Amino acid sequence: QLLPQKRPAEQRLEISAAAAAAAASAVSAGPAAAAEQKTAADACAAPPPKKRKSKPATRCPSAGRLSASASLDERSEPRTDPFAALPSEAIDFAFLSSSERTQAIESPSLLLAMLFSDGSTSLDADQSNRTAEEDIRNGTALLLYVPSNCSTPPTPGSGSRKEVKRERLFYWRLENVAQQEKHGLEDFAVLRQILAHPRVATFSFYRILCALGKHVSCHPLHLLSSVEQLGLFDIQVVEWMLQTSDRYPDLSAMWSTYMEAGAVHVSDLGAPSPGARDHPSHAHAHLHPLALQFRKVVALWPVVRRMLRSRDLVRAYHQQEALLPFVLAGMSLQGVRFNAERLDITCNFLKTRIHAIEREAQQIAGSDTFNLASPKQCAELLYDKLELHKAQRAGASGTTPSPSLPQTVRHRSTGEKALHSLTQLHPLPGLILQFRQLNKLLTSYVLPFQSLAVGADRTAQFHTTWSTFTGTGRLASSNPNMQNL
């Protein structure tokens, strides 16, 4: 369905060509083959059967849980349709009436996630490899998950649980979000209502904001200012506050850590499948993987909230850390522009200078195959052929032994310190240092940024990934690393 459909005229042309080819081959093949070829030609000329148009289902029949309709092997195959990665019971937000939308949003608890064009979600593991540019480009649908009453935390201010019959999953296509947003921020109240929900949680809201940014013209900070009171609880950010490290908090790793500590239990994910005692690792294989991830978030939610409160970090989270995803996503969406034409000039200059240095070094080495980028070849030329570690330096009154060279030279090193100590003995060490400096500029800063200038007009803009998931809480950037510049 994602591929462009051929028009009827094109289909008729292809059918006629196939029939003509079959008839021509029949004439040259004899009577027996002609009959077979005629049958094939008639089959080609026959119009394709008409397919009955089916209306898109607004929702599947009610089910007690998000069950898996495919086997584990089938779900692991690559998919071209990102919505095929959703459970069959998922409900399209576009088919809900305004009252049904309000009822879904006003559920006792609500979880948010983002679906991307490759079928992955913001709940998946190993998020450190994902870039903001990929999230901005591949965001497909906003996922809204309503947990069932068995795992819904109590509403603040009351010890009672509001009963929800069964868990539900809604998906809101981002192109539909963009259509509503065209009418202005006043008509774009659904997203603001979700953010102001008193009990809404997510995992990596920064990625969700980046994906939304392509379809929503409103800056994330303006979106934040339109919400009277932010009720969002980002479990990934809270986990970093509780366990500060240089690694991205991962949902699967969090679940394993807290389960080993006894804070959560496998029973929090729901009733196990029959035969789970024989195969504990497949206790919830009957659940859809996405439903399983959402249930993990629901189970971890009250645990990390209690730990945040016990360490007196609630105020720091709500007044500082919860607001940072809006700032960082705004920075990523804004992007950084650069002069692509000036970069081309710099690239040509560096390539010309590097080529000249390589030719000069090859003349010294007496070989056209000498490679300045090879430490092994440089060491053989410096220490075996030129024997610079044994060289004599000419003084004012004749020849005097060269000063004591560093230990790195005696160990045939081609590091920067050793090469600097040899620059006064021969021009080759200086050429190696120049080559490395210019080649570093070319390969690390010039060529990667040239690849970011895309399109016929070579729009020179990139969207770096910002994060505070560091050991000290400092700001870090990657893909590309702006702080390295």
Image (spheres, rainbow, N blue to C red):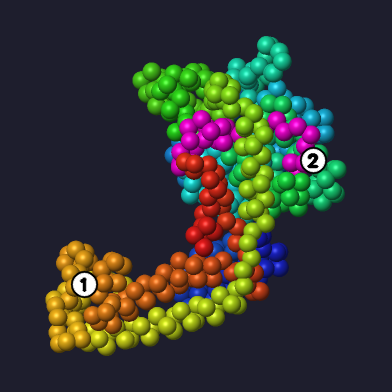
Q: Is residue 256 magenta?
A: no
The residue indicated by pointer 2 is 226
Q: Quadrant of residue 423?
A: bottom left
Whole-percent x, y for residue 132 in the image: 58, 52
Residue at the limit of the structure toward the front, as seen here: 397
Whole-percent x, y for residue 300 in the image: 54, 25
Residue at the limit of the structure toward the top, as seen here: 159
Whole-percent x, y for residue 279 in the image: 37, 23
Q: Is residue 234 magenta?
A: yes
Q: Is residue 66 above or below residue 27?
A: above
Q: Which mark is residue 209?
A: none
What is the secondary structure assignment of the residue under circle 1?
A: helix
Q: Quadrant of residue 411?
A: bottom left
Name the side, left or right, on which 116 lies relative to 418: right
Name the side, left or right, on which 45 lies relative to 103: left
* Amino acid bearing label 2: Ser
Residue drawn 53% across and 33% down? 241
The residue indicated by pointer 1 is 379
**The magenta segment:** 223-249
What is the secondary structure assignment of the residue under circle 2?
A: loop
The residue closer to the viewer here, 386 or 482, is 386
Residue drawn 47% across and 41% down? 471
CB-based contact (under 8 Å), mark 2 and mark 1: no
Q: Is residue 8 above or below residue 310?
A: below
The residue closer to the viewer here, 426 or 311, is 426
Whole-percent x, y for residue 216 in the image: 74, 50
